[in-house]
Image (spheres, helix red, strand yellow):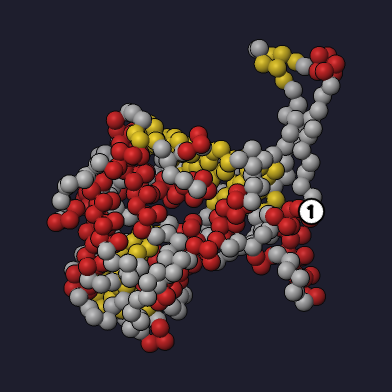
């Protein structure tokens, strides 16, 4: 019998359930010392004021729970830009170790090139600072083991990773929908981050490789580290497990400018229960076959036996989008009618596949009926939901970048565990390391291999 379209009551009750993910995941950690800033404001420094660092500083200006008192970069121009972007007249440093020596500094945010993540994070932890480090958390296998050991020996210090989708109410609600069975058995995640033309080689007179660090394996994990890492983490989260193995193909086929990282990658991950993540990132086309073609570049499609979620995180100029589709069924056809009406073309039997489902927006807590609304409040919710259904409006959330930064300062003050904590960051880095290995060696790479990779090597600890 064909599945019925969900009733309005069922849709309101389930798809619009208020997310509880943030409260559930903020597990208390041991108490830490009170922060030094007035009114419990976290005093922090930014290490690395290139493109990502200044982007974070721009967002940090609107967050009252932290105050920037120091910035650091080895490049004079970047350092000047960082000081200006902070808007708090922070002191500038060329050597991050001088910054870490400050007794009035509670925390640091790290936005240096990937190959330096472990080194700077290690030194910050040893200096007694709380740490927010952009993904990927570490670069090499030996650093996975070394950082786990160090961070676990300092449980009173917060260590958070920059995986902002973990802080999106849309993604948290999608996870709840999966847990409630609304998608049936989730079997696949299909994800992409395509660009056109992708990273470009900057022409500079000196230090070309360091300036273009994303394009060289000496410094970078390539597309896997810089882009795929976000979406591998989404699949881990939605499946509720980590991959068993990965296979993949990477190519340096289109960007002939001296780089040695792949300019296109295709990866398949198998999870326990035979669930799979299918991932692609290319540099020659940015089309996204989700949301009716209204967005480009990146997004995820979560496929279950009873439904589908299309989702993508927002940017400074575009909102987060989350759409839920119920799974349509082929229409019932009697055996007699089937015998008369089936058509065979090139050996394929054509039957009705069922009408396509109309997407429902994932509704956020502000749009839910609690029974406690005033008359005007209830009518406003009805109005918003009607506008959503007509495509005039879409549900919106606070930029997850702002949320993750505010949450970091909250964890520093309270000792709560971050949603994107040490183990999530290390699992994500492990996926990057093993994915690149699978493409380089052209084989199936098992995630258990990380347990022996880099073990006994002291380079990560003494660098």
Query: Is residue 374 in view?
Result: yes
The image quadrant where one finds the N terminus is top right
Image label count: 1
Judge whether residue 223 can be spotted in this image.
no
Taking 241 as reference, is 55 above or below it? Answer: below
Question: Which of the two residues, 377 or 210, is positioned nearer the viewer here?
Answer: 377
Q: Is residue 312 left or right of residue 12?
A: left
Direction bottom: furthest residue: 38
409 with respect to 217 (left or right): right
Mark 1 secondary-structure assignment: helix
Look at the image and tell me in which quarter the C terminus lies. bottom left
Q: Residue at x 44, y 69 (%)?
A: 28
State which quadrant residue 157 falls in: bottom left
Which residue is painted at 44% across and 37% down in the image? 269
Judge left or right: residue 299 versus residue 11.
Answer: left
| Residue located at (73% from left, 29% from top) | 353
- Residue 12: x and y in percent read 74, 57
Identify the residue position indicated by label 1 in the image: 8
Q: Residues within 10 Å of mark 1 (few under 14, many from 20)?
A: few
The residue closer to the viewer here, 278 or 203, is 278
Q: Where residue 450 appears, x then y in whole percent?
A: 30, 42
Query: Residue 64: x and y, percent?
Result: 45, 79
Q: Position of residue 160 (x, y in %)?
A: 38, 63
- The residue closer to the viewer here, 70 or 412, is 412
Report the side of 96 relative to 187 (left or right): left
Identify the image quadrant of residue 170: bottom right
Q: Residue at x 21, y 65 (%)?
A: 123
């Amino acid at each position: 019998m064909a599945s019925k379209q969900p009733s309005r009551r069922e849709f309101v009750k389930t798809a619009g359930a208020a997310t509880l993910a943030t409260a559930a995941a903020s597990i208390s950690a041991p108490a830490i010392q009170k922060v030094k800033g007035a009114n419990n404001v976290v005093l922090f420094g930014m290490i690395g004021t290139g493109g990502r660092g200044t982007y974070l500083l721009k967002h940090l200006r609107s967050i009252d729970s932290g105050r920037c008192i120091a910035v650091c970069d080895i490049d004079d121009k970047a350092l000047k830009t960082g000081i200006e972007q902070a808007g708090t007249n922070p002191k500038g440093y060329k050597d991050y170790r001088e910054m870490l020596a400050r007794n009035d500094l509670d925390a640091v945010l790290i936005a240096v090139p990937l190959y330096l993540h472990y080194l700077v994070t290690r030194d910050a932890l040893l200096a007694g600072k709380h740490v927010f480090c952009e993904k990927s958390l570490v670069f090499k296998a030996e650093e996975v083991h070394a950082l786990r050991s160090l961070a676990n020996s300092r449980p009173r210090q917060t260590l958070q990773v920059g995986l902002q989708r973990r802080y999106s109410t849309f993604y948290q609600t999608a996870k709840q929908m999966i847990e409630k069975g609304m998608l049936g058995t989730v079997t696949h995640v299909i994800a992409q981050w395509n660009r056109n033309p992708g990273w470009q080689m900057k022409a500079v007179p000196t230090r070309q490789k360091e300036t273009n660090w994303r394009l060289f394996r000496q410094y970078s994990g390539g597309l896997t580290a810089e882009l795929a890492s976000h979406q591998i983490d989404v699949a881990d989260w939605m499946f509720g497990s980590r991959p068993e193995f990965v296979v993949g193909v990477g190519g340096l086929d289109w960007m002939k400018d001296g780089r040695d990282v792949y300019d296109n990658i295709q990866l398949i991950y198998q999870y326990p229960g035979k669930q799979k993540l299918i991932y692609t990132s290319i540099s020659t086309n940015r089309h996204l076959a989700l949301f009716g073609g209204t967005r480009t570049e990146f997004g995820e499609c979560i496929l279950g036996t009873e439904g589908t979620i299309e989702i993508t995180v927002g940017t400074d100029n575009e909102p987060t989008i989350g759409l839920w589709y119920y799974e349509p069924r082929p229409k019932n056809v009697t055996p007699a009618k089937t015998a008369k009406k089936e058509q065979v073309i090139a050996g394929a039997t054509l039957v009705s596949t069922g009408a396509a489902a109309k997407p429902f927006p994932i509704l956020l807590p502000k749009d839910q009926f609690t029974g406690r609304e005033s008359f005007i409040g209830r009518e406003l919710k009805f109005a918003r939901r009607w506008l959503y259904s007509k495509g005039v409006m879409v549900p919106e959330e606070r930029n997850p970048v702002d949320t993750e930064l505010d949450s970091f300062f909250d964890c520093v003050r309270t000792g709560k565990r971050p949603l994107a904590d040490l183990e999530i960051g290390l699992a994500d880095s492990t996926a990057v390391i093993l994915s690149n290995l699978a493409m380089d060696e052209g084989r199936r790479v098992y995630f258990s291999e990380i347990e022996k990779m880099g073990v006994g090597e002291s380079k990560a600890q003494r660098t």
